[in-house]
Image (cartoon, coloured by chain):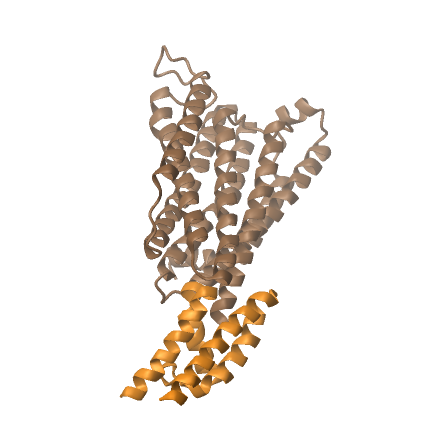
């Protein structure tokens, strides 16, 4: 149960970062990426999936905007989140 | 399939509707009789008259295309997000935009037919002008009202409230527009006889005030307020990429509403004559129709970007 709570918090954190760029569409966007590319339900998203998810997001966001600065800033925020999650996991 | 279902089916296929309206309008330009007043006013031959009408008609057709394409894209986006918190508001926005897109071709085609009838039957001219005035009022009025409701829903979904300064600005703007409109309209009336219909609108003043002027003022208020609320939603929306796309849509909608108001305002100050004339009225109409067309293009671009966010 604790593991499940931890997993859903990863999803929530990814959505929170994404919200800065995609606003109300953030939740739906991340859920779709997790389901379509990682073939998981959003609740099953774990720290281990983050790197792969970020790679997919980088590709997909490039289809929404040509602005590389925004894409890099967004993925940098997500990578920062991934590093923090991995560190927290290692510490525990 | 009953008539209502058929009408819904046609409206839901904007590009088919556009083609039907465009072909109808072009045929009417070629088939309907030319106004003797138009021919004598500009020394046109029948052929020259139709060439001029066709040239202007082609500009109109391009702007109609933009309008129908714009509302099609907005409807597609609304359908895509129908199960979300903003879904119902965007659906309403698409319906209101569709009313505005339909308003110009419908009013123009019907008025062309009515005017053509009046060329051969002079007594029908007042009826033609009265019906054209009402039609040009009712269609945008419905559109503005629906867009206003949608804008208010979006404001509520975003937990936004109109500012006091914003409301006061709209009130002052509407007061200025309204006073100028009332003054210009009343100068064409014999105010000593409330039942007199010898005026450019062919209506007694009391009917004019209650069924044309008051609804116009309401429509302009609804349009201006909707523009204000939608612009707030666009500016305050969260999400950099989402906001950029939404701002395109919102800017387009604002341009469409303002240009629609401008055209109706112009025809309120400078009443319709019941025949085609090459004058400053036409120039302004074409200018504002092109502006509205640009607005619809922005709506389409915004809707395409928003839809892409929801698809990939």
Q: Report the side of B59 relative to B178 (left or right).
A: right
Number of numbered discs present?
A: 0
What residue appears at the point 41 percent right and 52 percent down from the top-left corner? Answer: B233
One can see residue B259 in this view: yes
Between B30 and B281, the residue placed more toward the observer is B281
What residue appears at the point 44 percent right and 54 percent down from the top-left corner? Answer: B94
Between B115 and A87, the residue placed more toward the observer is A87
Compared with B189, B224 (above or below) is below
Residue B258: image x %, image y %?
49, 39
What residue appears at the point 51 percent right and 34 percent down from the top-left corner? Answer: B262
One can see residue A64 in this view: no
Q: Residue farthest to the top?
A: B192
Q: Tell me the colour chain A is drawn in.
A: orange
Quadrant containing the N terminus of chain A is bottom left
Residue A29: image x %, image y %?
45, 72
Q: Residue farthest to the front?
A: A91
- Give the quarter of the image for residue B38: top right
Compared with B31, B197 (above or below) is above
Q: Report the side of A43 relative to B297 (left or right).
A: left
Tell which chain the image draws in brown: B
Quadrant containing the C terminus of chain A is bottom left
Between B223 and A52, the residue placed more toward the observer is A52
Q: Report the side of B6 relative to B312 (left or right).
A: left
Compared with B200, B53 (above or below) is below
Q: Report the side of B5 relative to B108 (left or right).
A: left
Between A73 and B245, the residue placed more toward the observer is A73
């Amino acid at each position: 149960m604790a593991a499940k709570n931890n997993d859903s918090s990863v999803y929530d954190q990814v959505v929170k970062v994404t919200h800065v760029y995609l606003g109300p569409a953030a939740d739906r966007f991340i859920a779709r990426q997790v389901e379509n590319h990682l073939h998981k339900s959003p609740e099953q998203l774990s720290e281990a999936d983050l790197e792969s998810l970020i790679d997919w997001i980088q590709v997909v966001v490039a289809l929404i905007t040509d602005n590389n600065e925004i894409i890099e800033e967004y993925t940098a925020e997500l990578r920062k989140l991934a590093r923090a999650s991995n560190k927290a996991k290692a510490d525990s | 399939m009953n008539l209502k279902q058929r009408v819904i089916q046609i409206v839901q296929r904007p590009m088919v509707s556009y083609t039907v309206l465009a072909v109808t309008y072009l045929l009417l330009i070629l088939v309907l009789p030319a106004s003797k007043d138009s021919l004598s006013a500009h020394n046109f031959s029948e052929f020259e008259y139709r060439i001029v009408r066709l040239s202007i008609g082609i500009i109109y057709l391009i702007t109609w295309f933009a309008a129908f394409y714009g509302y099609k894209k907005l409807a597609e986006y609304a359908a895509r997000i129908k199960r979300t918190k903003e879904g119902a508001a965007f659906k309403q926005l698409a319906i209101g935009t569709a009313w505005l897109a339909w308003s110009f071709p419908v009013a123009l085609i019907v008025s062309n037919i009515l005017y053509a009838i009046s060329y051969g039957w002079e007594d029908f001219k007042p009826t033609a002008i009265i019906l054209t005035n009402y039609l040009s009022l009712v269609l945008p009025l419905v559109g503005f009202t629906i867009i206003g409701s949608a804008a208010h829903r979006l404001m509520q979904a975003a937990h936004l409230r109109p500012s006091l300064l914003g409301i006061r600005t709209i009130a002052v703007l509407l007061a200025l527009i309204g006073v100028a409109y009332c003054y210009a309209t009343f100068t064409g009336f014999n105010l000593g006889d409330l039942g007199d219909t010898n005026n450019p609108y062919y209506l007694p003043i009391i009917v004019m005030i209650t069924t044309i002027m008051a609804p116009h003022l309401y429509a302009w208020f609804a349009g201006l307020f909707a523009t204000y609320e939608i612009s707030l939603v666009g500016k305050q929306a969260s999400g950099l990429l989402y906001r950029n796309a939404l701002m395109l849509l919102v800017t387009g909608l604002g341009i469409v509403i303002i240009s629609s108001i401008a055209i109706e305002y112009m025809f309120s100050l400078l009443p319709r004559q019941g025949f085609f004339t090459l004058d400053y009225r036409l120039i302004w109409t074409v200018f504002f129709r092109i502006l509205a067309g640009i607005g619809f293009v922005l709506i389409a671009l915004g809707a395409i970007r928003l839809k892409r966010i929801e698809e990939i």
